[in-house]
Amino acid sequence: MGDISDSRPGPDLRQGIPEDRIPDGGMIEGQVDGEPVLLIHRGARFYAIGARCTHYGAPLVGGLLVGEGIRCPWHHACFDIRTGRASRGPALRDLSCYQVERRLDLVWVSGPAVHDAVPAPVSDRPAPGRIVIVGAGAAGTAAALTLRQEGYGGRLTLIDEDTASPYDRPVISKDFLAGTASEEWLPLRSHQELKEKDIRLVLGVPALRVDPAERTVRIADGRAFPYDALLLATGAEPIRLALPGMEHPRVETLRSLADSQRLIDKAAHAKTVVVLGAGFLGLEVAASLRHRGLEVHVVAPDQRPLEKVLGRELGTRLQRLHEEHGVAFHLGHTAVAIGDTSVQLDDGSAIGADLVLVAVGARPRTGLAGRAGVILARGIQVDQFLETSVRGIFAAGDVARWPDPLTGLPVGVEHWAFAMRQGQAAARNMMGAREPFQAVPFFWSQHYDVQVSYVGHAEQWERLEIVPGLPPGEWEQRYLVGNTLVAVATIGRDVRSLEAELQLERDQAARTSERRSGSRPSATLA
């Protein structure tokens, strides 16, 4: 996250701002009755909305205006500047909206505005009478809230075996684990808020069986929930290694809030931790536990962290950052056994360990879908509308594999903000919208005070271009297949990350249009 501690309240917008102070497409942060407010000039009109993203409080004045939306510079949430509505995750709360008046060449913000709370229907088709969502993580919770936001008035049930759901999962490996964020940060919505939206929350009991013929979901306590549309947002589960000692109580994986709380408890009595895995999760945990003062060792078979995802140069840069903070790397090695006081490596050496975290990836939780006869392909296979092979059953989030707009092949992107956007799209399609899901993937990863932002998707690339001559602390590199830009990774370049996302969206839309018209897709290069 960024730092807004130095932000100033700005001018009092109740006193008026000269119109020519804000050019078309410009914006200025001020305040109304002590609250930060963003005044935006767009075309012939001015708009005023809350100035802080409702996700982590980023100053939206540093974001990007796209059409009638403002995109957050930190984590790419989007809000409608006309209404303040949160239209794209990871933000799930709307911004305040204010009345704007113009007189005597001044623009005045006169006070809060009230908008019609009844949205336009997403489809002429009748909405399903009963919707059940299995999984109250990013995708499931976003779907439930979107359904109510879009005016869905039917029976809505949200099922999850985690009693703490729904909560902000990325924080559990970052600020919460580091001890810099309290548990109050975590809920995406309180249980009371969901109740007020008439969302029935069923927690602490896993779903065992989906019967597509009877259209019911049966859970472990024997209850059955009928549905007319079903969303499977069952997420993923940590991969456990087949190692001697893996069942030792000192060994942990991290996926849930309960996992993070156990890690915190054990870290309080530990001096040394060994992290198996040098992916995003492993490195984030390494940074968090270094913040708690533990000696941290990272073991991974790769020659450098994240090289397969980010490339050699950025992987090396992140390794050096962690080394500067005291993390010891044991790369090119794997663990062969976990003993009572140490971890044995494949070269015969051993690392003393009071605590071991296994962070070697996750696999989609497909059991429920598979037992229901849904087609699987390294996850739950869905079409462009996020519907599975069984009519009326949709899937979203880490478990879903949907057609890649670039290749047409099933692909999965297991990232928090993207899962939310899939959940939002699935919600609209369950209501009959039939809108193809075409969002560009985005994720962020926090390492001490450095955030890596990544837009696009590049399981493989042919060429990697590093932008030269950037100021210290900034980084940008572009991943290309032929002359087609497929992804961009940045550090310290928030607006550039937003611009790259917009470019990828436009390129993707152009390719889709070309395929539909039967013309040959043209290569694009930023």
Image: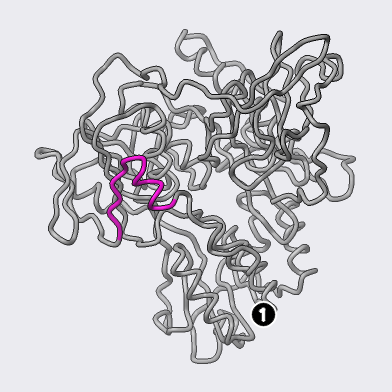
Place residue 394 in its image quadrant: top left
Residue range in magenta is 190-203
Residue under numbered circle 1: 294
Establish if 108 lies above or below 301: above
Quadrant location of the C terminus in the rendered image? top right
Amino acid identity at mark 1: Leu
- Rate crowding at label 1 as few (under 14), some (14 to 19) or many (20 or more) other CA atoms within 10 Å: many
Q: Measuring 53% from the left and 64% from the top, which residue is drawn there?
A: 183
Q: Measuring 50% from the left and 80% from the top, which residue is drawn there?
A: 336
* Residue at the farthest left position: 214
Q: Seen in the image, is 80 located left or right of residue 125?
A: right
Q: Is residue 349 visible?
A: no
Place residue 173 in its image quadrant: bottom right
Q: Measuring 42% from the left and 21% from the top, which residue is drawn there?
A: 119
Establish if 113 lies above or below 285: above
Taking the magenta stretch, the answer to whether it contains residue 411 is no
x and y, in percent, of residue 108 in the image: 75, 20
Q: Measuring 68% from the left and 80% from the top, which residue is drawn there?
A: 295
Place residue 38 in its image quadrant: top right
x and y, in percent, of residue 205 in the image: 25, 60
x and y, in percent, of residue 440 in the image: 55, 32
Label 1's element?
loop
x and y, in percent, of residue 118 in the image: 40, 22
Q: Is residue 171 visible?
A: yes
Establish if 167 lies above or below 266: above
